[in-house]
Amino acid sequence: LYKGLYWVPTPLYALFVTLYHVVYVEGTSSGLHPNSTQLTRIGRIDYTQKITEMSNRASVTSIPTSNLTLLYLHQWLQEQAFAPGVEFLRKIVPANMAHLQYLHGLIASSYDPEEPTLGAFVVRAIAGNVTTIGLVTHQLQLIGWDVLRVVLLDSKARKRLQLATRGGNWGKGGGYSVNGGTPAAILFATSPVVPVKPEPGQVLIPKAVQDTKLLLRNRLSKAI
């Protein structure tokens, strides 16, 4: 607590956050190269110098500041349990420009078809009645997911989810046509080993949680 007024991150946490921003937000636009010490460009921030200074303040000696690459920093963040999972990488790469395209290699190398992925599916109020939740569960099972648990949310849990969860309150103000209402239930399931079967004309990445959500929405919009 700085001067009794502001919470200031520790030097180590500040280093984690900076590296996360460099690797997964700026990518090659940061000036760092995926697997070479040659800089892609000189940006407004000299991240080589900045990371060196922050590493020294945090007493971190495991980052070779003379040999900085994006892929090494990703591996280092993984070792510190601060790197995002494959599902998150799948979501951010298609939506961004070429500066994050190097992450495609990370996605391919991290994908294990024999390792199931845990997914959490939030059902909104518009589909929150028992019958529709049963329909969601059934559709997940038809796709190939193994539903582990269905959690119905009481009023306190719904409010807590809206306030504390990223995306819990998106689209507020436009009614069900915008966001489907408040959260009503959460379904926890593990992904299938076999690829998700797409709808006609739809292309899906095997085992992607986001693709399954889109597939569910398309099916439920016809049923509700």
Image: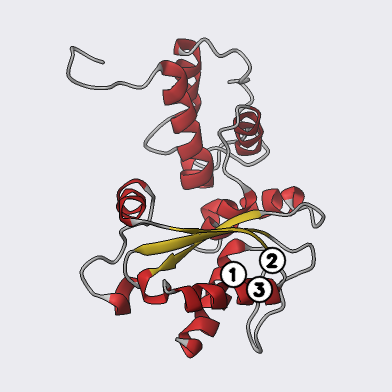
At a point 31% along the width and 62% down the height, the residue shown is 170
**Does residue 191 sit above or below 8 in this rendering?**
below
Spatial separation of the CA atoms under disc 1 and disc 2: 13 Å
On the image, numbered disc 1 is attached to which residue?
211
In x, y percent, where is residue 10?
Answer: 39, 17
At a point 32% along the width and 69% down the height, the residue shown is 181
Spatial separation of the CA atoms under disc 3 and disc 1: 6 Å
Name the foreground residue: 12 vs 34.
12
Q: Are marks 3 and 1 in contact (CB under 8 Å)?
A: yes
Name the foreground residue: 188 vs 30.
188
Q: Amino acid at mark 1?
A: Asp
Q: Of the two numbered discs 3 and 2 on the same chain, state the one appearing first in sequence.
A: 2
At a point 56% along the width and 33% down the height, the residue shown is 82
On the image, numbered disc 2 is attached to which residue?
145
161 vs 142, left or right, is left
Tell which tag, 1 or 2, sits nearer the viewer.
2
| Quarter location, residue 146 | bottom right
**Does residue 84 sit above or below 183 in this rendering?**
above
Spatial separation of the CA atoms under disc 3 and disc 2: 15 Å
Whether residue 31 can be seen here? no
Disc tally is 3
Q: What numbered label is drawn on residue 153?
A: none
On the image, numbered disc 3 is attached to which residue?
204
- What element does badge 2 sit on? loop
Q: Amino acid at mark 2?
A: Trp
In x, y percent, where is residue 83?
Answer: 58, 38
Tell which tag, 3 or 2, sits nearer the viewer.
2
| Quarter location, residue 215 | bottom right
At a point 36% along the width and 70% down the height, the residue shown is 125
Q: Are marks 1 and 2 in contact (CB under 8 Å)?
A: no
Which quarter of the image is occupied by the C terminus? bottom left
